[in-house]
Amino acid sequence: MLDEGARDAGEETPDPKTISRLEDGESSSVWRFAKVDRAAVLIDAADYFAAMQEAMLKARYRIFLIGWDFDTRIHLAEGRRWWQRSYKREYPVRLGSFISWLVRHRPTLEIRMLKWSFGIFKFVIRGSMWWDLTRWARHRRIDFKFDSAHPTGCSHHQKIAVLDNSLAVCGGIDMTVKRWDTRDHNEDEPLRKTPRGGPYEPWHDATMMMEGEVADALSDLGRDRWIRAGGTPLLPVQRTDRSLWPDGLEPTFENIEVGIARTRAAHRDWDKVDEIETLFVEHIGRAKKFIYAESQYFASRAIGEAMLKRVQEDDPPEIVIVHPRHADGWLEQQAMDHARAQLVRCIEEADKKGRFSIWTPYSGITPIYVHAKMMIVDDRIFRIGSANMNNRSMGLDSECDVFVDCEREGNGHAEDAIRRIRHSLLAEHCGLEEDEIGDLLDTHGSMATMIDHSITEDGRNLVRYHPPELNEVEEKVAESGLLDPEDPEDLFEPFAKGGLFRKGSRLARMRERIRRKKAK
């Protein structure tokens, strides 16, 4: 059982309907704002897994992990095996064994894990994971639950962790296979292996670890989701003064306020929540100088419309998107790659001043898969979370993003930190030093021109994306949104709302202009 002193004994877990009613506020783009004492943006899973293991070692009451996927076979400190212990380390590094070790050595600790239910089919080929779940079943303080509380065709996609209601994580990294990598993204990385020993391509990802009141807010969101998924209501944990912050982890931000936005499809008697889509459109509309974004997909009709509108202005902001060469998997490529081609072609047709560009990062001749979900606007807004720039993240899947807005009272001092994040990412992708980026941007006048002038033959590069020509079938799939719908009902009636090119929209008008040009 939990130490009762760590609970708010006078508070009961609210019914989901009550939580939903309490969530309703004046803004349609933000669920809640919360104070953060310090936060660290963690780029790539090598640093994240190590930081999470250290934080979990400090937890005493509850570790609450919410994700699209978990794989107990991964190593939180990659390169070690469960039998390899240093004289300073008495705990295993394999996730499944580490969870078991924690509950044996922390008598007041409970561990709750929630993952998307569809992934249960993957367990067939994850033999040792069955053994971990069997072992965990004997521990009443470990509860592993599958989330199927969504309409058919939707997924549970949030990546959240809450520890003792003191430390929280929100971002794009799942604790699963094929995520671990360092910021070097070496082409030949011997530690970048699946549990079965096979290599995988370089993987770029990001998340944010936060300490403070934001943990209470994300705990509320998580406990609500737990109940919706059929879990027994969880008593809230009351925060203490004891810090779980990993030793040596330098904060990116201190003393700020973050906003939290969500996506959730309508289901049963739960209303639809589309704060993330609304917030994307707001943030794109606020850009004065530039937008720098990283996303696994670029297929959202709403985001495409918002960016198309901006590039048609007399003085448009620069828009740079870092993106994988192809989506991961054949079906995803049919849904996302073809829609990307259509959107980019329309935006480029309207982009008379050349302010829009999409880039793929490479390590030598090897493309780096981009799984990060981040956006920076004018170095005044920084957002990170689980939502991609595709339709599913706007209306189908359960998502959670957090953001720092320098316009919020008390957040003005965060601008320098946001600028350092952008410079650090550009330096990483272009194989440059971070302290070079500011001068190079001043010299070249734009991110795109700087990127073009930093290309090397065999180092780290960003390669510009050019949309390929699609055949008739590929165009129909892309335009229908059949495989990437905005609403669960669109799965069965893909053209009911007009698909990617709704009648009278900017995108539809631009597509017609392109077709007329081709016909001449």
Image: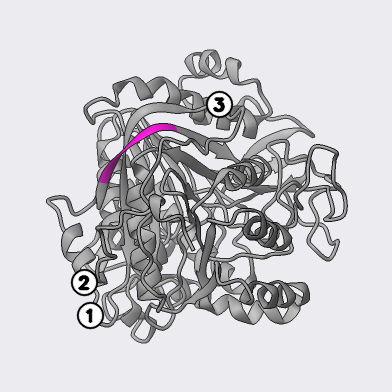
Which residue appears farthest toward the left when viewing the image?
A: 26
Secondary structure found at label 2: helix
The first of marks 2 and 3 along the sequence is 2
Q: Is 333 drawn above or below residue 34 in the view shown?
A: below
In the rendered structure, which amino acid carries the disc numbered 2?
Answer: Lys
Q: Is 490 drawn above or below residue 445 in the view shown?
A: below
What residue is at 68 percent from the left and 37 percent from the top?
183
**Whether residue 516 can be seen here:** no
Residue 54, how many percent across, how many down?
63, 42
Dot 1, how many residues are within 10 Å of its Cα: few (below 14), some (14-19), or many (20+)? few
Which label is found at residue 250?
A: 3
In the rendered structure, which amino acid carries the disc numbered 1?
Answer: Asp
Which label is found at residue 17?
A: 2
Question: Disc 3 vs disc 1: Cβ atoms closer than 8 Å?
Answer: no
Q: Which residues are magenta?
A: 33-38
Question: Disc 1 vs disc 2: Cβ atoms closer than 8 Å?
Answer: yes
Dot 3, how many residues are within 10 Å of its Cα: few (below 14), some (14-19), or many (20+)? few
Task: Determine the CA span between mark 3 and mark 1.
Answer: 43 Å
- Would you say residue 36 sits in the magenta stretch? yes
Colouring scheme applied when the structure was drawn: one colour
Q: Which residue is under mark 1?
A: 269
What residue is at 71 percent from the left and 34 percent from the top?
460
Label total for image? 3
Looking at the image, residue 62 sits to the left or right of residue 178; the answer is left
Q: Quadrant of the C terminus?
A: bottom left
Task: Determine the CA span between mark 1 and mark 2.
Answer: 9 Å
